[in-house]
Amino acid sequence: AAARRFLEDECGYTLDDFIDLAIGCRSDIDESAAAFGIAIGKSVSSQDLVEEARRVALETALDAAFDLESLEHESDRLPPVQCGAESARR
């Protein structure tokens, strides 16, 4: 999640942009390897990248939901916060 935020904030890349970049890089590497007679092996399909991106996004969302739930559970144990003139006098 931190890497995705960094790419979006610093580079302006969305997840789709990053997938396109990865596919383009892999294609360039395959072409360069072929030019030098090097066999790299199986290429990563775009569908595999999309499925992995979805899996990571779902995992990240679930982790965030669990973190939020645990924070909400902990906040239920805290004493209530007093607002207004009474708390300003302290």
Image (cartoon, rainbow, N blue to C red):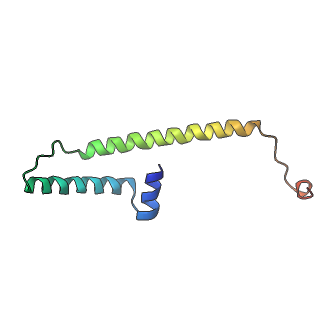
Of residue 87 and residue 37, the one placed in the foreground of this image is: 37
Residue 83 vertical position relative to residue 12 in the rendered view, above or below: above
Residue placed at 11% from the left, 46% from the top?
A: 39
Q: In the image, residue 32 lies at what x, y percent?
A: 14, 57
Is residue 73 rendered to the left or right of residue 10? right
Residue placed at 33% from the left, 41% from the top?
A: 51
Of residue 31 and residue 18, the one placed in the foreground of this image is: 31
How many discs mark residues in the rendered view?
0
Q: In the image, residue 56 lies at what x, y percent?
A: 41, 42
Is residue 63 rendered to the left or right of residue 37? right
User: Farthest residue toward the bottom?
Assistant: 11
Quadrant for residue 85, please give it.
Answer: bottom right
The quarter of the picture where the C terminus appears is bottom right
Quadrant for residue 35, please give it.
Answer: bottom left
Q: In the image, residue 2 lies at what x, y percent?
A: 48, 51
Is residue 37 rendered to the left or right of residue 9? left
Residue placed at 23% from the left, 44% from the top?
A: 44
Is residue 85 rendered to the left or right of residue 35? right
Quadrant for residue 10, please give it.
Answer: bottom left
Residue placed at 34% from the left, 41% from the top?
A: 52
